[in-house]
Image (spheres, rainbow, N blue to C red):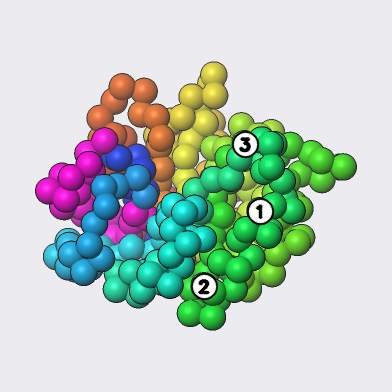
Amino acid sequence: MQIGAQFYTIRDFCKTPEDLALSLKKIADIGYKTVQLSGTCPYDPKWMARQLEINGLKCVITHTSPQRLTDEIGQVIADHDIIGCDCVGLGSYRFGQPDCTVENFLQTYTPVMDKLRESGKYFMYHNHAHEFEKIEGKTVLQQLAERTDSAKMGFTLDTYWVQVGGGDPAWWLEYLKGRVPCIHLKDYAYGAKMAVVGEGNINFDRVFEMAEKAGTQYMLVEQDNCNGEDPFDCLRRSYEFLRSRGFR
């Protein structure tokens, strides 16, 4: 398994192409080799492909806006071809809000999954905590897994949000085996605070064990809230912890 950086962590430093280019270099200088592009300014995919090449980086997954997924899927596929990325991610869906049901999700995104599958790409859904609400005895996440084709939809399992939702990240990795090529590593500290990986309370050694068994290829560090610290320094400390566990 390889480790990477989720750019949503440094979204405030990616608001212009110039800043985005500098951030790519800073991430590469820390030592990361893979990234998830999310929360950045718009960019030309050819420009991005060149920036990735310059910095020795590979984009392994994105978060793509719902509007683009439903209305511009052909262009989304073409853009991902250019940057060499096969996993196309949806960052959230407001389950529990009016009209945000599992049925509506499937109606909206099954055609997207089909188009991506036809092009050799993979639709990835990123969980938060609300997917752990139980409806008729099953969590929303279970219902999504049971009602979608594993060949067409995977899960960017987020360790922190699983914990917030009352779940066990390692258990869910085992449950979603074969459907978690990319996951998010985010630590959980006292008070539900997001923390640098290795500085909170999640049993990451168990997470790593189950992720490997589940077929995970990329573990991407994400820290939405760095609690006033420099997000690049937080990513560096997470990287050093992961290096200490033998990952590169």
Location of the C terminus by quadrant is: bottom left
Q: Which residue is mark 3?
A: 129
The mark that comes first in sequence, 3 or 2, is 2
Give yes or no for residue 30 being in the magenta stretch: yes
Give yes or no for residue 110 being in the magenta stretch: no
Q: Where residue 30 appears, x then y in whole percent?
A: 22, 48
The magenta-colored residue range is 12-37
The mark that comes first in sequence, 3 or 1, is 1
Q: Residue at x 29, y 25 (%)?
A: 229
Residue 241 can be seen, yes or no: no
Numbered tag placed on residue 105 in the rendering: 1
Q: Nearer the viewer, residue 50 or 244?
A: 50
Give the vertical position of 173 relative to 127 (above or below): below
Residue 41 left/right relative to 209: left
* Residue type, label 2: Leu
Q: Where residue 162 appears, x then y in whole percent?
A: 62, 40
Q: Residue at x 26, y 47 (%)?
A: 41
Circle nearer the viewer, 3 or 1: 1
Based on the displayed image, in which of its 4 quarters is residue 133 positioned? top right
The mark that comes first in sequence, 1 or 2, is 1
Q: Nearer the viewer, residue 58 or 64?
A: 64
Q: Nearer the viewer, residue 1 or 186?
A: 186
Q: Residue at x 43, y 65 (%)?
A: 72
Q: Which residue is mark 2?
A: 116
Q: Decide: few, some or many residues near mark 2? Use Cα within 10 Å; few <14, some 14-19, many ≥20.
A: many
* Residue type, label 1: Phe
Q: Decide: few, some or many residues near mark 1? Use Cα within 10 Å; few <14, some 14-19, many ≥20.
A: some
Question: Alpha carbon of mark 1 to alpha carbon of mark 2: how far?
Answer: 16 Å
Location of the N terminus by quadrant is: bottom left
Residue most extreme to the front: 71
